[in-house]
Amino acid sequence: MKRLKGIGLAVVLLLGTVVGVATPANAAPVICETFGSTSIQSGRFIVMNNVWGASTPQCIDVNQAGGFTIQSAGHNNATNGAPAAYPAIYAGCHYGNCSTGSSLPMQASNAAFNNIRSSVSYTYPSSGTYNASYDLWFDPTPRTNGQNTGAEVMIWLNRAGPIQPIGSQVATVTLAGVTWQVWFGNVGWNVISYVRTTTGTTLDFNINTFYTDAVNRGYAQRSWYLTSVQAGFEPWVGGAGLTVNNFTYTTTGGGGDTSPPTAPGNLTASGTTANSTNLSWSPSSDNVGVAGYTIFRRQGTTGTFTNVGTTTGTTFAATGLTASTQYQFYVVARDAANNNSPQSNTVSVTTTGGGTGTGTCTVHFDAWNNGYVAQITVNGPRSGWSFAFTLPSGHALTGSWNAQFTTSGSNITAANLSHNGNLSAGQSTNFGFQATRPNGNTQLPTIPGCTVV
């Protein structure tokens, strides 16, 4: 279903029809005009009727305190199509109709964007088919007029009847202390909808909380501009009685949470294969609540870490890795106000070789009182090879040859070099290493897949 909120207004204006209601700033009018609107609180907010998806009548009773009630509605739209309207109260700009003092449009990369907060309180009737939702509009430019083409972020606190957002469900996430279904679709711009899994009547949140999630999923960009923050309803059938009791919008943080969570602890990796590894860590704590975790990765031991995923739990499956390659990971916790914790410890892993073949492997140890040498023979046929093993406690690698060795604590991975990875039947190659061990210790490492000879 295609939401073109306000496009009908643009068409009417082109046809020369007068729309809207000219009302005194202190009035509390009833608006029945299709695209009628009025400003309240000296222009701080605008309330609009916005019947864009039907020809059925709708009237809203505006509340100067910061809200409105749908007084009457004759809607009967099909529930598998678009809604009839989006009556809403908003701060910012909608098709050239701008409130005052909102500081919008504002680029999401602006530090001040982190301080934008909004809250709403809803009342629902006992009948009708509708959603109660925020509508946050983003554009690649600081647009004040016309259709935004970046992202539309919708936050559904409630839905009644067999309706669903644009697109399909892609995830479930916990944000602002609440669990939401995440839906994604595109109708000429990205539509990211967060559908509350339980009915809600109030929400007080930092705009960046939801936008960060959308950015992390690749559906939005930090370079885009927030143009308006809107709260209202999308009615399909009926709608009379739907009420926004109170709406707030602030660019100063609204006294919100500013304390970050503690750092995640004891990050470890396990079950490493040629293209994946499993991360786990101890949970962070927060004065309000931890909303989730962001996982960062880099290849090797130098260079920049990049964001590779988010989760609301304390485990993460890192996939898409390259065989016989070293990676490092760390994790950062975030709360509902998008405060980020210090980073966890860094863990290093080396993926296995991922080679194929049926060749055998043997290992021979030459040992003495406080050390040993391991001579390993790899037999073909093989297409690449890698051996991961763990040194016993107190042992240390002191030398190696004819293989690429990577070390993470006592975990060692030896992988083929470019000249000795592909072995035909009857061919073989040798590599080895030397290690020390405590005086009197007789332990030797086990090389998985190799027979001791």
Image: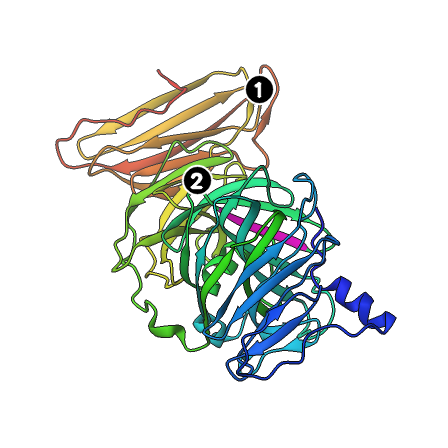
Question: Camera-side residue: 257 or 54?
Answer: 54
* Residue at horizontal 70 percent and vertical 76 percent from the top: 96
Please state the extent of the stretch shown in magenta in the rendering: 190-195
* Residue at horizontal 57 percent and vertical 40 percent from the top: 169
Residue picked out by circle 2: 350
Question: Camera-side residue: 17 or 442?
Answer: 17
325 to 137, vertically: above or below: above
In magenta segment, residue 75: no
In magenta segment, residue 194: yes
Report the predominant secondary structure element of the magenta stretch. strand
**Whether residue 318 can be seen here:** yes
Cα separation between marks 2 and 1: 27 Å
If the image is split into quadrants, where does the C terminus sit?
top left
Labels 2 and 1: the sequence-earlier one:
2
Q: Residue furthest right?
A: 15
Amino acid under disc 1: Gln
Query: Residue 164: which quarter of the image?
Result: top right
